[in-house]
Amino acid sequence: MINQQIIKSKTLIHDSWLVILFPILFIFTASSNYFFISPEEILILLMGLFLIAKIFASGKAVIINSDTFIIFAIFCLVYFFSLLSRESIGASHVKIAISLFGTKLLLIYLIYTSIKSFSFFKKVIGCLIAIGLILVIIGGAILLITQDINYFRSTIYFSQDYFSGFLKHTVFFNPNFYSRTLLFIMPFFLLPIINLKSIKYKLACLAGIIGVVLMTIFTFSRMSMIALSILILLIVYKLGNKKIKKRKAQFFLTTFFIALILITQSFIIERFENKISQYKNQDTTLRIEMIKVGLKSFYNNPILGTGPGSAKEMLSQDPGLKKHIYFFKGNRDEFAMHNNFLLILVETGLVGLLLFLMFLCSYWRYINKIKQNLKPDQNYLSTVLDAVRLSFIAFILTGLTAVNLGMNIIWFILALPFVIDRIRKE
């Protein structure tokens, strides 16, 4: 009995404060490309062990009473058991089957069970905002130090110096990955602006939004620019909080955003013209070729798909696609589906895709339901839900041209409404 109490007290300490480490470890998520597992996945496994110890000590487990969570859990099981659709199963396939969605399900559950109070919830959100500001500052410093506007888009790939080698283990290793991370975090900069009285925090977060806009533009990521434009318009539309003079805020943000577009229009136009020229000069572009290969695989395996990890293998083995890869990307390994929904369709078939779409629709309704049930004095939680909705929109939009399902940062954010639902009831 005494041993169980000791275990319980220790796990209560560890699993709560370890949550703070998640936003920090996201910075080094790219290390999984070299070490088979990312730092935040190690933390998920560690917290999972604490969770087992806590369940053993208390003799009971916490249940997330949400249809949305149940739908996602069913989808995760379907994805895992789609391994049976594969002709051969290796260790790498099992890892993908577990890590792509299984660890995300566990992450949501860990966040739900670890954040037990409103005060600690605010600390976690504060840490997320701080990491976002740090990423903006580091990105700006990199551009100033290198004095290379194309550093994120091309230079980092070919540089052999120690500085670039270190950055390849961080979110800066890929311009699209970096810009998507900023887009997911940016909506949370609204919290201090709307809910806090401190001018310095408001200015810091306003500068953070400006920094995200600049860094996204300088990564030259087309879909990130489109998603950013939509998010800015939604933010301008939503800034009707009583604490903010709506017309002045909307006028300032709109004017600033238009000015940035005008200043950087030559870079943006060049990026889109390059893509248009690819359609003119070639019968098909690289991504259209990927879509064709993916749809062909779906046609041959429409119900249950071809199993975890099969999409990348299929793309790498297609001779026509290899030709396009070498034409557009040289010798770099770029075999990726570039679309969340197509990846799920190929690997889990119609069954998996329908379940995933059910989850997305259910999640959106779940957020709206929680927001409607909040009390008038729960403005902070309401603003967090608004931020989560914007991050969710960014997740959907950027997932149309890239597979961002493996980005743990977005699943960390998507776990927050489950916590809010419990906090509001308490």
Image (cartoon, rainbow, N blue to C red):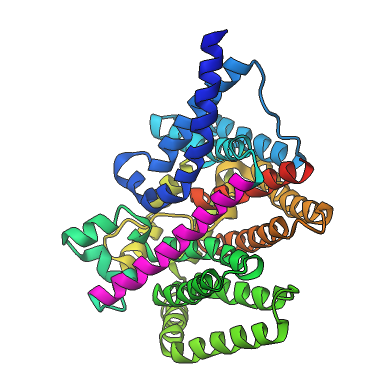
| 308 magenta-colored | no
Q: 412 or 114: which is nearer to us?
A: 114
Name the residue: 51% across, 51% down. 409
Q: Looking at the picture, how far across and down is residue 406, in whole percent?
A: 49, 48
User: Does residue 362 show up?
Assistant: yes
Residue 288 as seen in the image, left or right of residue 321: right
Magenta stretch, residue numbers: 119-145
Q: 285 or 55: which is nearer to us?
A: 55
Q: Looking at the picture, how far across and down is residue 152, in whole percent?
A: 33, 69
Quadrant hosting residue 328: bottom left
Q: Residue furthest left?
A: 161
| 136 magenta-colored | yes
Q: Residue furthest front?
A: 198
Q: Looking at the picture, how far across and down is residue 351, in whole percent?
A: 68, 41
Q: Looking at the picture, how far across and down is residue 333, in whole percent?
A: 32, 56
The number of numbered badges drawn on the structure is: 0
Q: 357 or 193: which is nearer to us?
A: 193
User: Does residue 289 show up?
Assistant: no
Q: Is residue 371 above or below residue 224?
A: above
Q: Is residue 54 above or below residue 379?
A: above
Q: 268 or 248: which is nearer to us?
A: 248
Name the residue: 39% across, 29% down. 91
